[in-house]
Image (cartoon, rainbow, N blue to C red):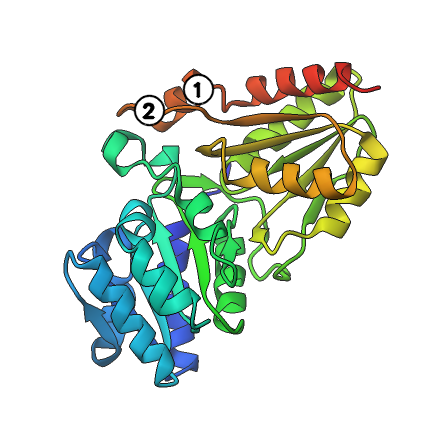
Amino acid sequence: MTNMESTREAFGKALVELGRENKDIVVLGGDLNKSTMAIMFGNEFPERFFDVGAAEQNMLSMAAGFAAAGKIPICTTFAVFGTGRAFDQIRVGIAQSKLNVNLVCTHAGLLTAEDGISAQSLEDLALMCSLPPMTVLTPSDGPETVSALKAAIATPGPVYMRLYRPATLVMHESGSHFKLGTIEILQNGSDVTLIGCGPLLESVLNAAEILKEQGISAEVLNVSTLKPLDEATLVKSITKTNAVVTAEEHYIHGGLGSMVASSLARNYPAPQEFIAMHQYAESGPAKPLLEKYGLSSNGIVEAAKKVISRKK
């Protein structure tokens, strides 16, 4: 049976474990603590847990104060609220001061699905990547989420981590090694580089298998640290394949595809195809939405064939 796990559940369990190890960790929640799983920390450490209600701007300002006082604050809410509603507080109060605040937002991207257009955060990566000192993490599954959270807490400065509502395929072993700022090579190939982040990494791996059956060798990269981007590994792969497809369930501008395109333009120009959102979506089950907007394995396969045909 395929092992499935929600990244937010893995996050909640890891919070409790880290709270036992480090007394300086405090958790702030924005009225959605059961959904983000932050309530698990609150039940274990009520004296270090702060539910601010539906006041995300206040939550991030409080976190800045905790960080300035030497604590390690972890803020949790849905991605649309944590990055959009509180952007000014993050920019001025946290990023410009380079404070050690960890913003972990669940229910990110199109996979928020049935919650509808107003809750589907398709711009959060663009917002957070625009802030110079911000580290941006996009773990692909539960085990990687746990490892990424531990790395985030040990990393000075502000960190944004993007998590998801539904259970997703577990692709890493528990306790697997995670090094912040590096790209993970999941599969070697020679014809095209397929790059995924978050839950779309499963679709990327499936697309690589389909391409293999058709005689096309795909290299698969997992970008779990979107910023800072591991340009050395990226360029090394592209110099071998000379073609790249990026896949994300985020708006086409400002996320994974944009970060990769910017790097290649400066280091090694090569044809690129973008699997991403081009518009806002509607409410509906996650899988049909991914199919409708071309974010499936079949969409990645077609993009791979197209970008290979563009090689010079």
Q: Which residue is mark 2?
A: 281
Q: Residue at x 56, y 18 (%)?
A: 299
Q: Looking at the rendering, in which quadrant would you find the C terminus?
A: top right
Q: Is residue 100 left or right of residue 302?
A: left
Is residue 188 in view from this perspective? no
Q: Quadrant of residue 291?
A: top left
C-beta proximity under 8 Å, tags 2 and 1? yes
Q: Quadrant of residue 261?
A: top right
Is residue 44 in view from this perspective? yes
- Dot 1 surroundings within 10 Å: few (below 14), some, or many (20 or more)? some
Is disc 1 placed on a helix, strand or loop? loop
- Dot 2 surroundings within 10 Å: few (below 14), some, or many (20 or more)? some
Q: Quadrant of residue 195?
A: top right
Q: Is residue 112 left or right of residue 236?
A: left
Residue type at the position of mark 1: Tyr
Residue type at the position of mark 2: Ala
Tell me where residue 29 appears, x and y as whole percent.
24, 62
Q: Residue at x 48, y 71 (%)?
A: 153
Q: Which residue is mark 1?
A: 293
Of labels 2 and 1, earlier in sequence is: 2
Tell me where residue 225 appears, x and y as whole percent.
58, 53
Picture layout, residue 195 above or below residue 276: below
